[in-house]
């Protein structure tokens, strides 16, 4: 069984046991280990596929917070030719690493 969930403006295809890095979820701290994703867009089990409009009613994905990590560094470089203008900046996104525990329909 698999599901497509939406969190942090992105969509992820998940199944039980998957470990994935998602955008930092507001309201979730290090002490809270259980996370429930309720924006489930699709649930599939073999040939049986349920597509939501926009979400599948009553479906949820349970996950466990594994760790808080940071993404790769992204370099932001601004440049204007012939004007001696250069600005270099870096950014690392805060992420939550989660393990999918189960999918309920």
Image (cartoon, rainbow, N blue to C red):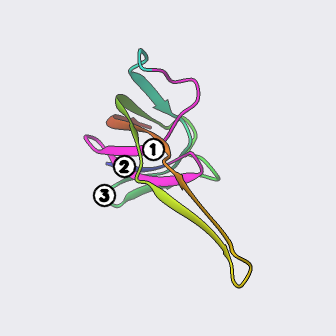
- Left or right: where does residue 73 sit relative to residue 81? left
Which residue carries the number 1 mark? Answer: 22
Q: Which residues are magenta?
A: 6-29
Which element is circle 2 on?
Answer: strand
Apparent side of residue 72 relative to residue 85 in the rendered image (left or right): left
The C terminus - image quarter: top left
Residue on which disc 3 sits? 46
Q: For the residue labelled by badge 1, is the local secondary structure a helix, a strand or a loop?
A: strand
Q: At which x and y percent is residue 17?
A: 25, 40
What residue is at 33 percent from the left and 37 percent from the top? Answer: 100
What residue is shown at x 57% (from left), y 45% (from top)?
8
Task: Evaluate if marks 3 and 2 touch, with contact meaning CB atoms under 8 Å apart.
Answer: no
Of the residues under marks 3 and 1, which one precedes in the sequence?
Answer: 1
> In this image, 46 relative to 40: left or right?
left
- How far across and how far down the image is residue 52, in percent? 58, 52
Residue designated by label 2 = 14
Secondary-structure class at tag 3? loop
- The residue that appears at 51% across and 24% down in the rendered structure is 28
Residue at the spot 64% in from the left edge and 52% down from the top edge: 54
- Which one is in front, 58 or 67? 67
* Disc 3 to disc 2, C-alpha distance: 14 Å
Residue ranking furthest to the right: 83
Label located before the other in sequence (2 or 1): 2
């Amino acid at each position: 069984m698999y599901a497509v969930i939406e969190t942090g403006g992105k969509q992820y295809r998940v199944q039980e046991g998957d470990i994935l890095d998602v955008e930092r979820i507001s309201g979730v701290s290090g002490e809270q280990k259980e996370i429930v994703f309720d924006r489930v867009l699709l649930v599939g089990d073999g040939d049986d596929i349920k597509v939501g409009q926009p979400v599948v009613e009553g479906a949820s994905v349970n996950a466990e917070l594994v760790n808080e990590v940071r993404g790769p560094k992204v370099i932001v470089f601004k440049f204007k030719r012939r004007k001696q203008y250069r600005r270099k900046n870096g950014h690392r996104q805060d992420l939550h690493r989660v393990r999918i525990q189960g999918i309920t329909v």
